[in-house]
Image (spheres, grey):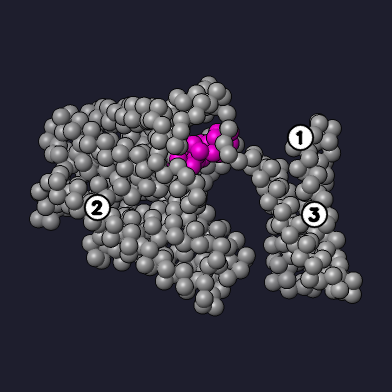
Amino acid sequence: MFHEHLLLILVLLLAVFMLIMVGQKLKISYPIFLVLAGLGISFIPGIPKIEVQPDMIFLLFLPPLLYEAAWYTSWNDFMKWRRPIGMLAFGLVFLTSIIVAYVSVAMIPGFTLALGFLLGGIISPPDAVAAGSVLKNIKVPKRITTILEGESLINDASSLIVFRFALAAVLSGQFSMTQAVGQFFIVAVMGIVIGLAIAHILYVIHRFLPTTPSMDAALTLMSPYMMYLAAEEFHFSGVMAVVSGGLFLSYRSHEIFSSSRARLQTVNVWATVAFILNGLVFILIGLELPAIMADMGEYSISEAIWYGLVISVISIVIRILYVMPIAYVPKWMGRTKRADLKNPAWKGPLIIGWAGMRGVVSLASALSVPLLLGNGQGFPHRNLILFITFVVILVTLVFQGLTLPVLIRWVGIKDTGDFLPEEEQEAGIRLRLMKASLHKLDEKYSHEIKDNELVGFFKKQLENDAFIVEQQLESLTCDETEKKELDLYRHILLDIYSVQRHELVALRKEKFYSDEELRKQESQLDLDEAKVLGNLD
């Protein structure tokens, strides 16, 4: 039975990947195709239902997804925009949870306030992956993406704490708002303490023990689970432990890896893991949807769809009404409110307000709702909560995800941030590094440059690379003829790299050189090609 289920998962995962490829061709955010794939799977005739324990969903999926989000969050940017991030991540989450709780109680027969807060905690956090994927190929100010990413990281934590308190209230049959608020701060703060403590231990292991690249990558995969389980063991917030520990290790990432190979390997491993986890969650909901719709209890499918649509609209409206007035609060603009003629105050908040798409964290939270209460009875309205969550994700991802690029083009927002364009930043950084290297060679190794051909060749290579980067910087403000010459140079390089790849294939067939040495050359070729492709993107 297990191998049949595994084969089914692999086939469905492959189908999801194919859909994502279509999305890339159409330049449509891949989370939109994930939710559509989940819906499509539910309509496959005879699709079997795979039983996965709800508590395993929470444990397997959420720690790595939260850790990955924390790892790629810039601490400097996070602190720079901490006010709007905090107001969205805490204020908006709590407001959304409260309003959804009371609306659902008033609208849905038999719904209790604890169930309302449970649903509110599930659907309140927007998804950074969805927003980032939509904004990837669109020019928007850096502060908007920073706020959205930072908000998603912290609101995942705050909403999941709300979810846990509401779940405990449903299981115990008791709910006290005053007690919940007090406990919230205790479990959150202690979760942060435990997360940071474990992160410091892992920092020491990475930094001072003789780890290998494979061990470094494996340790990063183990880290979120260790933080989460340690905090939960003491009944504190595992979510806050993962987020705080992930932020600390991310900030120290330049110190902890044993080599550049370890960094490259870890990044590639995490990109793959996060991508697969996102796909698996939507496959699981697709496999469960038929059973969910078949056992909705006293509610019809049309009623459940109506509840989902109403709560979707409420979630969208709450976010816009909350975000827009904050544009006129001076604290959002810094110590002084400055006029921005290119970007009136309403443009950025409107985009942030419309980018509140729900995604994988909400879905994983809903799937983790237990099947039974402590007394053995079925969890009340579980299937309805799951169905409403899926409808909210479907509406926000598809509707808002497809219309967000249109909205951005309509408002015509310009990037007037503190930094140069990304391409100029990249070229400037590389040029500084090369010049520093050349200075060090001339200062410390002038004798070796003359007597050692390899060192002399290395210096010439650095000088050539520096000249090329200087030309690239100049080309960013040059005329079209010079840009065409630079583009031609890049394409010639790519063509040469392609020839080298074919030659590596031929060398592998000749079996004269070891595969290990051939792989090393291939890795170097990958790095060289990545430099050119990075300039072309």
Which residue is the site of mark 3? 465
Q: Decide whether residue 137 is among the magenta residues.
A: yes
Residue 452 placement: quadrant:
bottom right
How far apart, in angstroms, are the residues tagged by discs 1 and 3?
A: 20 Å
Q: Is residue 351 above or below residue 466?
A: above
Instruction: State whether the magenta stretch is mostly helix, strand or loop.
Output: helix
Label of residue 224 in the image: none
* First in sequence: mark 3 vs mark 2: 2
Residue 359 in view: no
How far apart, in angstroms, are the residues tagged by discs 2 and 1?
A: 52 Å
Counting labels gives 3
Magenta residues, start to end: 128-147
In this rendering, the label closer to the viewer, 3 or 2: 2
Q: Is residue 374 above or below residue 350?
A: below
Three-letter amino acid code of the residue under disc 3: Asp
Which residue is the site of mark 1? 477
Q: Is residue 61 left or right of residue 31?
A: left
Which residue is at a point 55% across and 66% down the rendered structure image?
255
Which residue is at a point 29% across and 28% down the rendered structure image?
314
Which residue is the site of mark 2? 185
Which residue is at a point 79% across and 34% down the rendered structure image?
478
Which residue is at a point 81% across and 41% down the rendered structure image?
486
- Residue 306 in percent (x, y) is at 26, 27
